[in-house]
Image: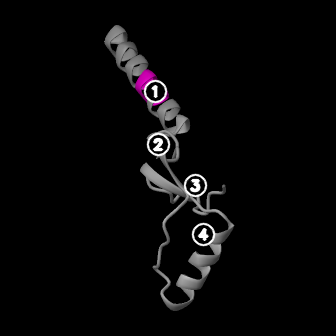
Amino acid sequence: VSWTEEPSKARSGVHEVRVLDEDGWAALRRARRTDPDATVAPLLAIQLQHPGSYSGPWVNSEVVATVLSLLVAYTALRNKNKILA
């Protein structure tokens, strides 16, 4: 059994994996010569739950660090001005 879709492009949800024997595979190849969308009754059909691929965090850590450092600098300068005033 192999996965033929790119993991980053694979949609999440339930996928059906159809298992064919040698005769079923030959029948599928014959049927697909005339009609590319043809299907043959599988020997076994397995339902595979695919949660989807991980695309990373919503915000990069560099952005969070920059925003936090700007917030700390702003608070420090504001408090310094209040003390000196």
Residue 12 makes an appearance in the image: no
Residue 24 makes an appearance in the image: yes
Disc 4 is placed on an element classified as: helix
Please provide the residue range marked out in magenta: 68-73
Disc 2 is placed on an element classified as: loop
Q: Residue furthest front?
A: 23
Q: Is residue 73 above or below residue 34?
A: above
Instruction: Give the image quarter of residue 27.
Output: bottom right
Q: Identify the residue position indicated by label 3 in the image.
A: 7
Q: Identify the residue position indicated by label 4 in the image.
A: 24
Q: Identify the residue position indicated by label 2 in the image.
A: 51
Instruction: Give the mark nearest the N terminus, 3 or 1.
Output: 3
Nearest the viewer among 55 and 61 is 55
Q: Position of residue 37 (x, y in %)?
A: 46, 79
Instruction: Give the mark nearest the N terminus, 4 or 2.
Output: 4
Compared across the picture, whether 23 is left or right of 60 comes to: right
**Chief secondary structure of the magenta span?**
helix
Q: CA distance from mark 4 to mark 2?
A: 30 Å
- Say what amino acid the circle numbered 3 marks: Pro
Q: CA distance from mark 2 to mark 1?
A: 33 Å
Compared across the picture, whether 48 is left or right of 79 comes to: right
- Say what amino acid the circle numbered 1 marks: Leu
Q: Identify the residue position indicated by label 1 in the image.
A: 68
Instruction: Give the mark nearest the N terminus, 3 or 4.
Output: 3
Determine contact: label 3, label 2, CB under 8 Å.
no
